[in-house]
Amino acid sequence: MPLRCLEYVTRIYEGIVPTKERYAEKVYNLPNPDFYVVYVGKKEQPLEKELRLSDAFYTKDGSKLELVVKVKNCSDSKLLPLVKSCDILKQYCQFIEIVEKNYNRLFPKRSFKKAIEQAMSQGILTDYLDRKSREVINMLCAKYDYKMDIAVKQEEAREDGRQEKAIEAAKNAIELGLTTEQIMKITGLPQDQIKELVKEEYI
């Protein structure tokens, strides 16, 4: 997240500072940045924490480049006072809820567009979504593609684990002298794979 914030603020500064001013001797004044992430996920998280760019460096050598992101947890009902104290945070959380309810993995862009329209009709982040709808859709696509990628990898890992257990069970069954048909029923492995395991066992 700190790296993404660094990329984002760099693009903003590039838009603020005229090209010719970047090479001038006189210092061009920049607005002070503050970096926040609002967490609305399902995992247990502390109320607040900090993420540092330097945590990603190969060596912790007191590098002069640092960027600190403050993470605020707004996922739990006990944190409602925090949400109530900031109307933008409240609207952001409401918007994420609408996105989650409308999300369709087969038609992600269409579902995000629908979520934006629904949020605006309810007066949620109206001004921002009106100006930045395309950027928001692109951001959501990237976020949900990442979530889908993680989910697929987790399922593949589970499948690999099940496959390894089935193979181990098949080897044990072979040692016990069970028939191929019996091993197929026990493990769910195909006949060809069991025959290969039998060959390996008696080589």
Image: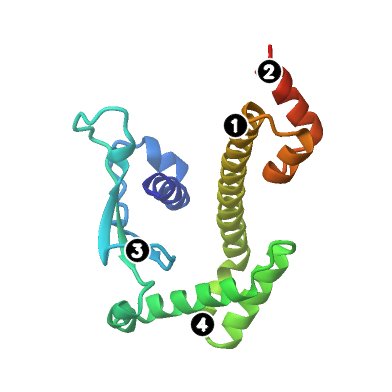
Image marks 1 and 2: residues in contact by CB distance under 8 Å: no
> At numbered mark 2, what does the secondary structure look like: helix, strand or loop?
helix
Q: Read off the residue under disc 4.
A: 124
Query: Going 32% across and 33% down the picture, which residue do you hit?
Result: 57
The Cα atoms of the two marked residues, 1 and 2, are separated by 13 Å
Q: Nearer the viewer, residue 54 or 144?
A: 144
The Cα atoms of the two marked residues, 4 and 3, are separated by 26 Å
Q: Nearer the viewer, mark 1 or mark 2?
A: 1
Q: How is the image coloured?
A: rainbow
The Cα atoms of the two marked residues, 4 and 2, are separated by 64 Å
Q: Is residue 77 above or below residue 8?
A: below
Instruction: Give the numbered dot on residue 172.
Output: 1
Instruction: Give the numbered dot on residue 44.
Output: 3
At label 1, the amino acid type is: Asn
Q: Is residue 56 left or right of residue 198?
A: left
User: Does label 4 or label 2 sit earlier along the sequence?
Assistant: 4
Query: Going 77% across and 26% down the picture, which residue do you hit?
Result: 195
User: Does label 1 or label 2 sit earlier along the sequence?
Assistant: 1
